């Protein structure tokens, strides 16, 4: 981890940069894969899976037998943990439903909105270096609550052509039936264009590496919506003398272990806290099974001493982290000053892992600074809101003249005439 002591404001721009691959290189790779999928469909998926995942599939769809086999492989403690997480996630997202509110804007003019689930959604579950079955809960549960009719799940197979049993168990638990063994750019391409086996969707959800993120962004050019640009994981921790260095180190490593393109940032007002946390990082790193991945991510990560907590918050708002951990006793005092963040964790006991798994909030969050203009996934992500209006005779008489004047001023006389005809009939 690179360290900086009281950097100048002019240096903050460089310090808030992320490790990235050239966007043009990524886009070319994506377009090449997409082109093959458009013309060769299933065969392209099979070929790309062999190329990237090192397995030759005979079937893209997960069978009922494979799901039953997976259910038998999951030990009871894990099943109960998944059920607890599912319950909390469902509680948190269910209360996000909005009641229909009819507003009479003028006497005789009633307007309201109603929600409808997006009919066809694709959810992408990373399964390469880590099988994120928790993401199945985070995306599948709100999709179900929203009333999405067709939920298509794509996730990469292992070298034996199998999906991690926890992903299959979790998908089955929440009622997702269409599961396919395809990952990476090719999965996003399949959901964008459709193939003989995989249905085209209207919106694609799910995190992934830089390739998946780039593919989702390109997919928008072909009429498919996406949840957000959710790429490599990241966390920013604000710490002071009231923080616990071993907790802070563990939180930083929990994101660093996601992959070599992850990034973690430590901001503190206390040089001793920085040094103690780095010592803890080095000690904890040694016993991690994913030590090499985490160590590589730490090369692109930073520990920075700033002059005050206010400066730390200001830096964080510029960085706009996916996860912000405010590991200070006074964390709640600064809530109003937090402007840009995907999800925030307050105090020494609010580890980011809670949000990743079982607190109830959604862990599919904007990365790479997109927390400045995107929200994390919620129930709203899976619905469309349609406006309705109903005008009575009194209503059109009340607002009709204003419409006529406005339409005429814009020289849209057919618009005016649609009102004039009605008003004349009511005279």
Image (cartoon, rainbow, N blue to C red):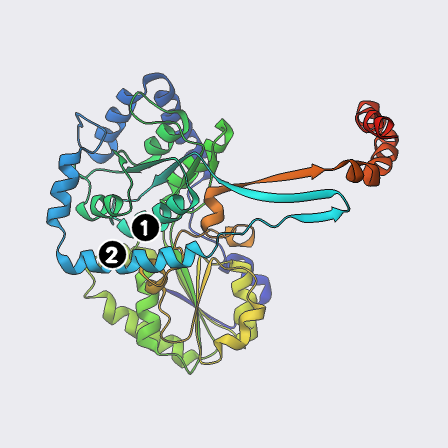
| Residue 77 shows in the view | yes
Mark 2 and mark 1: span between their CA atoms? Answer: 8 Å
Pick whichever, 120 or 399, lies toward us.
Answer: 399
Query: Do the CB atoms of the residues marked 2 and 1 lie less than 8 Å apart?
Result: yes
In the image, which disc is placed on residue 370?
A: none
In this picture, residue 270 sits left or right of residue 209: right
Could you say where residue 408 lies in the image, as x and y percent from the top left?
87, 29
Secondary structure at numbered mark 1: helix
**Of marks 2 and 1, which one's residue comes earlier in the chain?**
2
Could you say where residue 400 lies in the image, as x and y percent from the top left?
83, 35
Outermost residue, bottom side? 241
In the image, which disc is placed on residue 137?
A: 1
Residue displayed at 33% across by 56% down: 297
Image: 201 above or below 235: above
Could you say where residue 361 lies in the image, as x and y percent from the top left?
40, 59
Residue displayed at 24% across by 69% down: 284
Instruction: Please identify the quadrant where the N terminus is shown.
Output: bottom left
Pick whichever, 337 or 385, lies toward us.
Answer: 385
Image: 263 above or below 398: below
| Residue 295 shows in the view | no
Q: Which residue is mark 2?
A: 82
Neighbor class of circle 1 (other Cα within 10 Å; few <14, some 14-19, many 20+) is many
Could you say where residue 87 lies in the image, as x and y percent from the top left?
32, 58
Secondary structure at numbered mark 2: helix
Neighbor class of circle 2 (other Cα within 10 Å; few <14, some 14-19, many 20+) is many
Tally of numbered tags: 2
Figure quadrant of residue 255: bottom left
In this picture, residue 224 sits left or right of residue 352: right
Instruction: Please identify the quadrant where the C terminus is shown.
Output: top right
Figure quadrant of residue 83: bottom left
Residue displayed at 46% across by 37% down: 118
């Amino acid at each position: 981890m690179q360290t900086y002591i009281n950097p100048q404001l002019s240096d903050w721009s460089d310090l808030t940069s992320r490790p990235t691959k050239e966007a043009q290189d990524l886009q070319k790779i994506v377009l090449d894969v997409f082109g093959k999928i458009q013309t060769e469909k299933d065969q392209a998926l099979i070929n790309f899976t062999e190329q990237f995942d090192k397995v030759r599939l005979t079937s893209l769809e997960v069978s009922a037998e494979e799901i039953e086999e997976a259910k038998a492989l999951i030990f009871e403690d894990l099943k109960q943990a998944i059920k607890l997480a599912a319950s909390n996630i469902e509680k948190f997202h269910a209360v996000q439903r909005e009641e229909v509110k009819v507003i009479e804007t003028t006497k005789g003019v009633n307007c309201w909105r109603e929600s409808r689930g997006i009919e066809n959604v694709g959810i992408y579950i990373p399964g390469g270096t880590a099988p994120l079955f928790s993401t199945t809960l985070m995306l599948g549960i709100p999709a179900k609550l929203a009333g999405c009719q067709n939920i298509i799940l794509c996730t990469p197979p292992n070298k034996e052509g199998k999906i991690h049993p926890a992903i299959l168990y979790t998908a089955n638990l929440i009622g997702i039936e269409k599961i396919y063994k395809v990952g990476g750019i090719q999965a996003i391409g399949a959901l964008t264009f459709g193939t003989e086996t995989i249905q085209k969707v209207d919106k694609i959800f799910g995190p992934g590496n830089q390739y998946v993120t780039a593919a989702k962004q390109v997919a928008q050019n072909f009429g498919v919506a996406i949840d957000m640009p959710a790429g490599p994981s990241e966390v920013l921790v604000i710490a002071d003398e009231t923080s616990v260095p071993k907790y802070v180190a563990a939180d930083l490593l929990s994101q660093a272990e996601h992959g070599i393109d992850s990034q973690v940032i430590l901001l503190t007002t206390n040089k001793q806290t920085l040094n103690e946390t780095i010592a803890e990082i080095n000690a904890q790193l040694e016993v991690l099974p994913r030590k090499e991945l985490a160590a590589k991510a730490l090369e692109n990560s930073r520990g920075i001493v700033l002059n005050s907590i206010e400066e730390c918050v200001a830096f964080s708002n510029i960085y706009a982290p996916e996860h912000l951990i405010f590991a200070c006793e006074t964390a709640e005092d600064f809530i109003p000053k937090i402007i840009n963040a995907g999800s925030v964790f307050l105090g020494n006991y609010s580890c980011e892992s809670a949000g990743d798994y079982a607190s109830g909030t959604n862990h599919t969050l904007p990365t790479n600074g997109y927390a400045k203009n995107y929200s994390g996934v919620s129930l709203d992500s899976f619905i469309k809101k349609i406006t309705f209006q109903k005008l009575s005779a009194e209503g059109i008489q009340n607002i009709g003249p204003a419409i006529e004047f406005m339409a005429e001023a814009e020289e849209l006389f057919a618009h005016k005439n649609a009102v004039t005809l009605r008003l004349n009939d009511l005279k």
